[in-house]
């Protein structure tokens, strides 16, 4: 099975399990912070489902309608996930504000604490797995999913801490305040994710350090009578596209020019996986 699809499926199963636990305990306890965490996990589940389908589609080979492949499906999924997270955070803030003006006592604090700690541990393990595969495959969708779960780890620990403080102090106003803090973290997460996922949809250039490495590879293969210019790059999902103009001595044969281009292209592809290189040969 495709590694990206397999780990995306793991995320779906873990989020479903956590949602069920949080909803049950949240309703039994009346804790808005636990319910906010259940909503957060539900958003994570939607993100996991979107990531699951997007990584399957993004790895589909290029076809007549999509000659450059389907990599941008991952970026689109990242944008959708960011918007879903934003909406969830706003909803949590509204519900928490209601609790501040109409406070209610939280029940079953012990069960709530146990669920939050369990959630944090499960999400920590799954997010590490997602991050590892995301780095191996350069998957935007999996990295976005991992980011959701990483944030959930922090918010779950935060809610658990709030429950302990309520138990020690008896101040139940802590519950909606913790929920609002969770929501603010989620808002920040949604903005960061949106910026990261949306940039490639505008065909933004690869990071400066990668451009420097690519330029060095080209320069290393250029002799004194050769040069290059108009280096361009873009990214779609985990696929990179690079093109540039290579100036050659007009005395070079087609065979020699082809060999030089092949050598440069192979070295760039060895340095960067899932990369397409287009070289336009020109004479001085």
Image: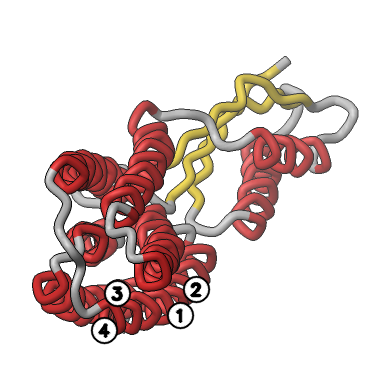
- Dot 4 falls on a residue whose secondary structure is helix
Residue 2 quadrant: bottom left
Tell me the tag on residue 111.
4
- Foreground: 238 or 67? 238
Q: In percent of the image, x 40 and y 34: which residue is there? A: 195
Which residue corresponds to mark 1? 125
- Foreground: 193 or 210? 193
Q: Residue furthest front?
A: 170
Q: Residues within 10 Å of mark 3 (few under 14, many from 20)?
A: many
Residues under numbered marks 3 and 4 in contact, where contact means CB atoms less than 8 Å apart: no
Image depth: mark 3 or mark 1 in front? 1
Taking 144 as reference, is 194 above or below it? above
Tell me the tag on residue 11.
3
Image depth: mark 2 or mark 4 in front? 4
Q: In percent of the image, x 75 and y 44: which residue is there? A: 217
Residue 274 visible somewhere in the drawing: yes
Image depth: mark 1 or mark 4 in front? 4
Residue 270's spot in the image, x, y percent?
A: 64, 60
Q: Residue furthest right?
A: 224
Residues under numbered marks 1 and 2 in contact, where contact means CB atoms less than 8 Å apart: yes
Please tell me which of labels 3 and 2 falls first in the chain. 3
Q: CA distance from mark 1 to mark 2?
A: 5 Å
Please tell me which of labels 3 and 4 falls first in the chain. 3
Tell me the tag on residue 128.
2
Residues under numbered marks 3 and 1 in contact, where contact means CB atoms less than 8 Å apart: no
Residue 202's spot in the image, x, y percent?
A: 36, 26
Q: In percent of the image, x 64 and y 42: which residue is there? A: 261
Taking 84 as reference, is 116 above or below it? below
């Amino acid at each position: 099975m495709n590694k990206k699809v397999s780990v995306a499926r793991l995320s779906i199963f873990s989020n479903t399990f956590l949602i069920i636990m949080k909803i049950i305990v949240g309703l039994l306890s009346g804790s808005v912070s636990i319910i906010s965490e259940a909503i957060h996990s539900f958003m994570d589940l939607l993100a996991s489902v979107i990531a699951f389908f997007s990584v399957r589609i993004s790895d589909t080979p290029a076809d007549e309608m999509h000659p450059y492949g389907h990599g941008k499906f991952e970026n689109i999924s990242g944008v959708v996930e960011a918007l879903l997270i934003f909406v969830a955070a706003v909803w949590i803030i509204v519900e928490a504000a209601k609790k501040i003006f109409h406070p209610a006592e939280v029940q079953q604090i012990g069960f709530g604490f146990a669920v939050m700690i369990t959630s944090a541990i499960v999400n920590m393990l799954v997010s590490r797995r997602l991050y590892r595969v995301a780095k191996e495959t350069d998957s935007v969708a999996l990295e976005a999913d991992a980011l959701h779960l990483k944030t959930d780890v922090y918010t779950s620990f935060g809610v658990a801490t709030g429950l302990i403080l309520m138990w020690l102090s008896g101040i139940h106003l802590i519950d909606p305040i913790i929920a609002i803090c969770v929501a603010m973290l989620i808002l920040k997460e949604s903005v960061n994710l949106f910026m990261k996922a949306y940039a490639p949809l505008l065909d933004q250039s690869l990071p400066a350090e990668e451009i420097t490495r690519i330029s060095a590879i080209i320069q290393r293969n250029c002799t004194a009578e050769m040069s290059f210019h108009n280096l361009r790059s873009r990214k779609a999902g985990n696929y990179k596209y690079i093109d540039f103009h290579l100036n050659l001595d007009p005395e070079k044969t087609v065979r020699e020019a082809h060999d030089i281009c092949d050598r440069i292209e192979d070295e760039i592809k060895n340095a960067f996986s899932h990369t397409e290189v287009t070289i336009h040969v020109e004479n001085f």
